[in-house]
Image: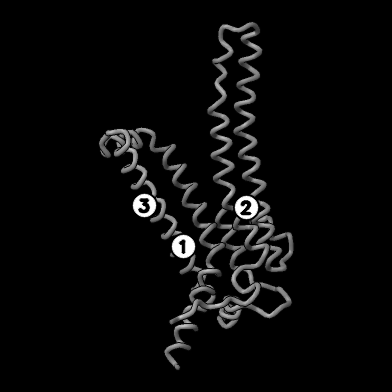
Amino acid sequence: MVKLPKFPAGELMKKQWVIALVLLLLIPLVFALGGSLSNLINPEIAAGHPNYARNYHLLSLLKTLCFLVSIASAGVLWLLACLLLIRSKKRSYLWLLLAVLGPLGFAALATLDDLTKVETDSYTRFLGKLNWIVRVGYEACSFAIIWELAWQAMVLKRTLMIQYEAATTGVSTAQIIDIQNASSGMWAFGEGMEVMYLVVLLYLLRPVVFRIGAHVTATLTSHKAR
């Protein structure tokens, strides 16, 4: 029987790395919560009550405030995730300026060499063996593959959502697609945000996937050699 590989302490994911991943996973939840709260607030319920104008204004302000707070909270989570990624690599906090570039900035942060003064893990050792030409090619290929994976994941999610909506509402998929095409700008923006979010997650998980693959390969090789 092949036993599952045991990962050395700290080999799979650093503490800062784990927290950064959790923060990134919280971003869509924060957006969803803010949007739900904003949708629950209907300024028109002030109609027929005294001080309608004032109450309508206050409810509208509260509705907008919920939306803005969700955006600000997501921004804070994003900055904290980038900061933790920088700290996990023992890099200068000045690298945090790249956070304003979104997924491109995160990709740049993910490619930084780890300056931690401890025994390096398998992924760090792998990067250390690459000369700069091969490293540039590796990072370019990684970016293209990760972006394509994120795009295909978004397309799959869109297809599944259309199929689900068609099954639950009885509306044909062609009609649903036509409705989406009528507001293509809004859908394109939303799907673009999904792709960028997935790109960031995949970059954060790239070292983890490499380490798991390296451990599994080493384990299988050792068993075959016996």
Where is mark 1, residue-wise?
146
Q: Position of residue 23 (x, y in %)?
A: 62, 52
Q: Which amino acid does label 1 sit on?
A: Ile
Instruction: Indicate which disc residue 23 carries.
Output: 2
According to the picture, the residue beneath numbered tag 3 turns out to be 156
Residue lying farthest to the bottom in this orientation: 226
Instruction: Please tell me which of labels 2 and 1 falls first in the chain.
Output: 2
Give the amino acid at mark 3: Leu
Amino acid of disc 2: Leu
Q: What residue appears at the point 66 percent right and 12 percent down from the top-left corner?
A: 54
Residue nearer the viewer, 208 or 89: 208
Q: Nearer the viewer, residue 62 or 93?
A: 62
Q: Give the quadrant of the N terminus.
A: bottom left
Q: Indicate whether 13 appears above or below 177.
A: below
Of labels 1 and 3, earlier in sequence is 1
In the displayed structure, does residue 177 sit left or right of residue 122?
A: left
